[in-house]
Amino acid sequence: MPDAQAPPPGRPALLAVFAHPDDEALSAGGVLARHAAAGARTAVVTTTWAPDSHRAAELADAVGILGAGRPRMLGYADHRLPESAPGRPRWCDVPLDTAIAHLVAHIRAFRPGIVVTHDAYGGLTGHPDHRYTHRVTTLAVHAAGLEHLCPGAGPPWQPGALYLATHPHSGVEELGPLLTGTGKAVLSAPDELVTTTVDVRPWLDRKWNAVLAHRSEVRRGRSLPGVLARLPAGTRDRILSTEHYTRIPLHERQEQT
């Protein structure tokens, strides 16, 4: 993702697809804010938590700070929290074809040039909802461009590229011990698989304020927003000021971000 200080005309729309409220800010908050500041259309699809939950309200505040419009929530239950969407199945239990069709409808309606989601690990901690979101999104970006798949989900639309939010081995020196100290995994990727590194310092205030908008997570001691909130500002800024992605090209059209 090239530097955005002088964005080219017609910067493609960006759709981020993440599992939980707060993933969008932590994983891609800087890129979302950067694209919005450059005049691009941006949006976030969140696969878990009900639209009438407290975390949905926090998500609305966060995406507003990032310039990504209103929340787009699939409304399924978190893997470990059935109360996150009473009466709805867990996201990980949704049949794959059903999950793909839901996301294809969002892709075709929003018509992004770029889609961003979790990497195959499901981020550093490997949460099952993150991994399933990766699988569904990877398949949905291909299905969205094929007219005979999901025919009831709108006219076909093919994004130009898929970016997987990831962490290289060399980029977790400070964050890794913080996560292992709370009993979480640290699943970083080989450096050579990271194709795109973005300096998001110009948008760091927006990114951090979006993280803070997830107030219930900031109050939790073991959550990443809570861990980050207890750090000295300088350490926290170093951790959050760079975002890493693996780019998966899909089509020659609209590949530039």
Image (tube, rainbow, N blue to C red):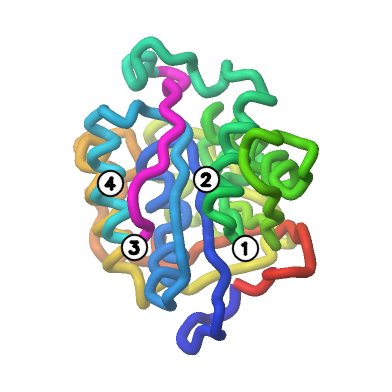
Mark 3, secondary structure of its residue: loop
Image position, residue 15 (x, y; %)? 52, 54
On screen, residue 214 versus residue 182, left or right, reads: left
Disc 4: which residue: 60
Q: Amino acid at mark 3?
A: Gly
**Contact, mark 3 vs mark 2 (Cβ under 8 Å):** no
Q: Is residue 75 magenta?
A: yes
Q: Which marked residue is nearer to the observer: mark 2 or mark 1?
A: 1
Note whether residue 141 is visible.
Answer: yes
Q: CA distance from mark 4 to mark 2?
A: 15 Å
For label 2, the crowd category at 10 Å Cα-Cα, with few meaning under 14, some 14 to 19 and many 20 or more, is many
Instruction: Give the residue pinned by disc 1.
Output: 113
Q: Residues under labels 4 and 3: Cα distance?
A: 10 Å
Position above or below: 9 against 198: below
Q: Magenta segment range?
A: 67-80
Q: Position of residue 188 (x, y in %)?
A: 61, 48
Q: Provide the residue designation for mark 2.
A: 17
Q: The residue under label 4 is which amino acid type? A: Ala
Res 167 visible: no
Q: Which residue is mark 3?
A: 67
Kind of residue indicated by mark 2: Val
Which residue is found at the position 70% from the left and 62% from the top? 160
Amino acid, disc 1: Gly
Secondary structure beneath dot 1 equals loop
Disc on the earlier residue, 1 or 4: 4
Rendered position, 184 above or below 178: above
Mark 2 residue element:
strand
Q: Marks 2 and 1, Cα distance to the nearest angstrom?
A: 14 Å
